[in-house]
Image: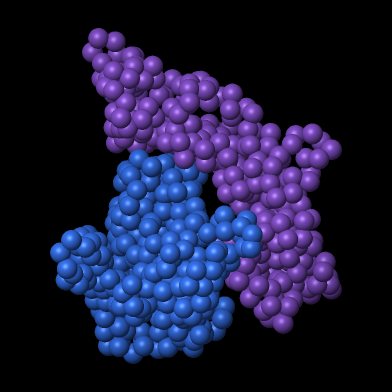
Chain colours: A blue, B purple
Amino acid sequence: MAPAVAGNAIAAAVAAAGAVVAWRVRRSAYRRERAAAIVRRAPLATAVVALYAAVALLGSIAWTDPVAPGTVARPRSLIDRCFPADFGERSYSAPLAAAEFYGGAPLAHPGSHLLGTDILGRDVLQLALGGARVALLIGGVTSALAIPLALLFGVTAGYYGRRVDDLVFFVLSTLASMPSLLLLVALVMVLGRGTFQVCIALAVTSWVDFCRLARGETLKLRELDYVQAARALGVSDFRILWRHVLPNLSHLVVITLVLTFSRLVLSEAILSWLGVGIDGSWGQMIDQARDELARDPIIGWNLGAASVALFGLILAVNRVGDAVRDVLDPRTAREHA
Amino acid sequence: MLAYLVRRLAWGAATVVGVLVFLFWLFFLYADPQDVARRAVGEKAPPAAIAQWLANHGYDKPAVWNPAAPLDTRLADHLRRMLGFDFGTSDADDTPIADRLRRGLGPTLGVTIPLLAFGLPLALAMAMLVAFFRDTAIDRAGMIASVLAMSISMLIYILAGQFLLAKLWRWFPISGFDADPAVVLRFLALPVAIGVASGLGGEVRFYRTVFLEEAGRDYVRTARAKGAGDARVMARHVLPNALIAVVTNVSLSIPFLFTGSLLLESFFGIPGLGAITVEAIQANDFSTLRVMVYLGALLFVAAQIAADVAYTWVDPRVRLG
């Protein structure tokens, strides 16, 4: 029950965040124009990202049906509910096959597994669609942890300077000097396996770059006339940061969010392969499928489905990320004007 | 220059101490020694065996504060070990860590040095090519290829490369390693090729941006006005000025020359430092992992200082002080 509740809560949070963003974009003509420019630059990629997000949200909303006493019930998501409840087979079957891959025993659902089944007889299409939820979780939870942290430290270091800056800079360079993959693995091993632990570890290794960026930008903003004017008028530090500095960092937040997303998902794939990833991710599907290429005859649909799903998302996010940077970053926007 | 170097070294030393303190917190304070011992000895081991294991590794000492003997703590042991490069024994099988590192260094450098030696010139050449033909079909095709290449997981590169080139077409051995100079290249060729291919997309994009930024500067216009051709402008004016970015990027990859590629080494059965790290992860061997993180950080700090000195060498305008 607990994972279903957490999944539903996260789905609700993501949907709410999406609604807030959409509302704020709609209200301002400037933001509407920016958003339209991003979509114009990468229409197909935006559509693909939206499709993945929809699948991820459907995969996050799950509940458990009442069952006869004595049987174990697992929560089933809206994605799972698109498939029959007992959609499993006993073992491998090829896409659309009518019989098991090894041995040829007849299947319970002949011809209906579009992408075949894996070693445990689970439908590969269902698993691959479920992976979108995990990818969204990795990107969403990690960003929700890392970005506020990076903003808090980056902005205070940049604004107050001196001792605070030295301290933050020391923490940043200490964390940055450790090889990120090794640090990631060390953190996951010590924190223990689990979705939230992996996200914490990813957040620790990924907030550094953005914190540096926020610090540098704040250093520049601090000297601008309107900030100086606000200070001369006796506006409190907190209010200056909240009203004058943070809004001017928002384009960096959006750019970083999109550009880091693909790196986070790819890192999780490597963690999965090292055996410390998140259950149900595409990385884990790839990890479980790696020996299947050595079988005779080989089994490719499992690996193929997971890699194509992963590749499609990363490619689309990278394209959208480039478009977002082109449109929102004043430096590149000038070049492309 | 000297004053700068001293300040830089002091800052580097402070960073290394920061890393050591962080590692101490993570592995000795956050991770429960009882838990570490149970993972190493076995879940159902009797308490006496666990106590014995803890005593053997010195993990039963007080963490930070020992009034009886102030230097007989886990923190003191940790700092002494790391700073003295006396790494002790593995948590998993009690072999000396330093011996394993020494054995693994050769195979790792056998992969990573060719990786850098082939990968960097190739990326620079391709980036120059697309920057040279900027805003043409070649540039656009190159950028699309780069984004496609960047979007493929390293795992897919390795699985697909191993399957196609080694298993199906039999150009290379599937995996393995032999230090005999006659055959060693056969074993290293495929991992190096896959490593180069997997990094190429991102690097070409990065260096293209650097080249284009330099190509927009005034001195390039001056060179053109003097009648220098496109090729000459690129090779003689843009490339030397882009070297700062190259130095930065290469210095960032230096730690990985030594810590090795976890994925490449363990997939291709190369007994290097990356494979040792993967073994340590799978065996819950915290002590080896700790040493690898520490060495990686040490090399990173050293490479940063070296890069700062190298900047003065590639760009006479940079003065340290």
Viewer-side residue, B11 vs A15: A15
The answer, for residue A244, to whether it is visible in the render is no
- Which quarter shows the C terminus of chain A? bottom right
> Which percent across, then down, holds residue A143?
35, 62
Q: Is residue B46 above or below residue A102?
A: above
**Residue at 69% of width from left, 33% of height from top?**
B106
Viewer-side residue, A65 vs A204: A65
From the viewer's perspective, is A200 left or right of A275? left
**Residue at 72% of width from left, 82% of height from top?**
B137
Q: Is residue A221 above or below residue B250?
A: below
Locate residue A296: give its quadrant.
bottom right
> Which percent across, then down, holds residue A189?
38, 42
**Residue at 74% of width from left, 45% of height from top?**
B187
Q: Is residue B106 above or below residue B256?
A: above
Viewer-side residue, B181 vs B241: B181
Viewer-side residue, B7 vs A144: A144
- Which quarter shows the N terminus of chain A? bottom left
**Residue at 17% of width from left, 68% of height from top?**
A68
Q: Is residue A81 above or below residue B56?
A: below
User: Number of marks in the image?
Assistant: 0
> Which percent across, then down, holds residue A223?
36, 62
From the viewer's perspective, is A28 left or right of A71? right
The answer, for residue B176, to whether it is visible in the render is yes
